[in-house]
Image (spheres, rainbow, N blue to C red):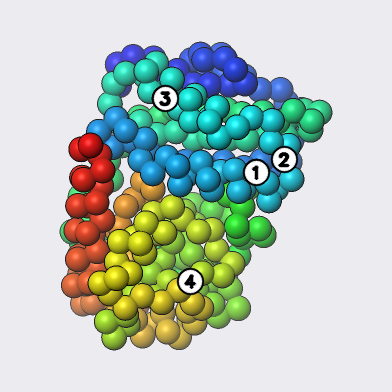
Amino acid sequence: MNNKIINYVNGKYDGPENSLITIYDPGFLNGYGVFDFLRTYNRKPFLLEEHLTRLFQSIRLSGINETFTMDEVREIIFKLLELNPEGELTFRIIITPGAEEQKSCIFIIVGEFLERSKDMYTNGVKLVVDDFQRSYPRIKSLNYFNFKFKKGFVKEKNAFSLLYIHNERVLECAQSNVFIVKNGKIITPIDDILLGVTRNKVLDLIRNSYGVEEREISYDELQSADEVFITATTQAVIPVVQIDNLVYSEGKPGKLTKEIIKIYGDFVSSVSAV
């Protein structure tokens, strides 16, 4: 991206060097805040309404004062598209209570979207198990300490991400949702996880054509799965071919996983072309 990035901070559109917040903001001091993250396809904010709906749900569940509307946030997103006229973009929308915790603050950080390696989709990725559960799973909070703290561990294991398992229950990955395929059924957790926008869209797209179950998945069931895949905004649908030392579908993306990758890709192409 050749042009200087323009962000939005509490009513002001400016470059990163001028995107300043007070050190007394609880988002900085205590990690008390929420965010959502979306990307563009063909310069169109993808699943914008779904992301905004989840953002405002996080705001309400976290007890942060709602001092702006969904319409106002939507308008800012489209203004930032005009001010950042090149390439595919990402938008990280951050909401904090503000220094006095009366008027909430809004920051929208714009980034250049970097495509994932095609190798991930053709050859799959490895996950490593971590015993962890989010404190408030339905809130997309700023607290990603566990994920950041263990990035070195993930790299050491030559893995793509952490897979959170707690009390023998499969939950989610650090930045994505997880699905397993077992005997032709596609199964994904529903309790004690962050409900991903991509997760929900994948379920909408396949529900009428495949056997789908949203329910608890035990660690034993994960180990005996036929296929595994993950979903996220920046990842779309990625096959998982290994978790710790266990290899799935002979170390290659499984048949149903490849079908779902195509279904989701076709959907993206159809809506981004409009």
Q: Position of residue 236 (x, y in %)?
A: 32, 52
Can residue 160 be seen here? no
Residue 64's disc is: 2
Residue located 49% across and 35% down the image: 92
The residue indicated by pointer 4 is: 189
Q: Specify few, some or many for label 2: CA neighbours under 10 Å numbering under 14, 14-19, or 20 or more.
A: many
Against 91, residue 121 (above or below) is: below
Against 107, residue 247 (above or below) is: below
Q: Nearer the viewer, mark 4 or mark 1?
A: 1
Amino acid of disc 1: Ile
Amino acid of disc 3: Phe
The reply to whether discs 1 and 2 touch (Cβ–Cβ < 8 Å) is yes
Q: Position of residue 4 (x, y in %)?
A: 39, 14
Comparing 31 with 125, the one in front is 31
The residue indicated by pointer 3 is: 78
Q: Specify few, some or many for label 4: CA neighbours under 10 Å numbering under 14, 14-19, or 20 or more.
A: many
Against 226, residue 52 (above or below) is: above
The residue indicated by pointer 1 is: 59
